[in-house]
Amino acid sequence: GAGVSQSPRYKVAKRGQDVALRCDPISGHVSLFWYQQALGQGPEFLTYFQNEAQLDKSGLPSDRFFAERPEGSVSTLKIQRTQQEDSAVYLCASSALTLGEQFFGPGTRLTVL
Amino acid sequence: ELKVEQNPLFLSMQEGKNYTIYCNYSTTSDRLYWYRQDPGKSLESLFVLLSNGAVKQEGRLMASLDTKARLSTLHITAAVHDLSATYFCAVDVIYESSGDKLTFGTGTRLAVRP
C-alpha cells in the first residue's frame, strides 16, 4: 500500500506569506505527527493527533503555527506570516496505534525569503 | 525534559573498518529507534529496540539497548560506501493523556571513504 505522502515537496514563500502543508497518512493510521527539521539538525516534535483530536501541540513554536485533522485522516499544517526562521523541512509521520512504529513521509522543504 | 545525545556528530571511516555510534538519553523511555537519512530524503527506520538487553542486527549494522545505563549503540562492521548517511537515534515516550512522541538525537553524519 501507499506510504505517507506530503505536498508540496518544496515551497518557497516570501516573508509574511501564509503557507499550508498537507499530509496524507497511511490509510487507517490513527496517530499522526508533525516534526520540524532544521538544516543539520534532528527532527523536533511539533504536534500529535489521535484521529481528529489534537492531543499534544506542545512543540508548536508560536501561535503562527496551526494544525488540523478534521476528519481523522488528512492533516494540514498552516504557518501564518512566515518568518525566515520557519525555513526547515516539515515531516509528517503516522502510526497505526499509540507507541506503534511511526512511518515518515518525504517531507516538505519550506524556504522563506 | 528528555534529552537525547549522540556522539560522534561526524564520523569519517575507512572502508572495511568497524566503529560504534553512541546514543545517551536522560529519562526512562518506552522504546528506542535508529533511523537512517540520506541527503534530501526522509527517515528510514532501521531498528526498534523495546527492552533492556535487546540486540538487533541487519547486515553490517547492529543495535543494542541498555535501559539501565540509558544507552544505545549502533555498531558498524566492515563499513562500505553505501552506509554513508546520517544516523539518528530517537526515544519514544508515552505521555499520559497526550499520546507518545519521538525525541531525536542530533544525528551522526557518517562518511565512508575508500
Image: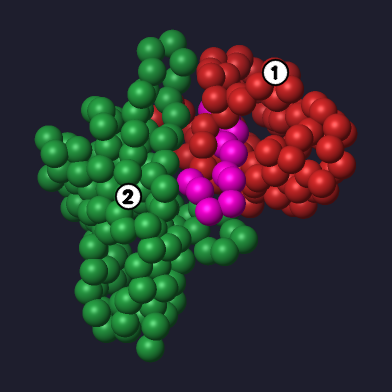
Chain colours: A red, B green
Q: In which quadrant of the rendered view does residue B71 lie?
A: top left
Mark 2 belongs to which amino acid?
A: Gln
Left or right of B92 on screen, residue B54: left
The crowd level at tag 2 (other Cα within 10 Å; few <14, some 14-19, many 20+) is many
Task: Specify the farthest residue to the bottom.
Answer: B114
Q: Residue furthest top?
A: B97
At label 1, the amino acid type is: Asp
- Which residue in the protein does label 1 denote? A63
Residue drawn at the location 76% of the way across and 29% of the way down? A79
Report the residue marked by disc 2: B6
Residue A94 placement: quadrant:
top right
Say if the magenta span includes residue A33.
yes
Answer with left or right where residue A23 lies relative to residue B59.
right
Location of residue A60 in the rendering, given as x and y in whole percent from the top left corner: 61, 24
| x and y percentages locating residue A6 in the rendered image | 71, 45
Q: Chain of mark 2?
A: B
- Are dots 1 and 2 in contact, CB under 8 Å? no
Q: Relative to A96, say whether B72 is above or below.
A: below
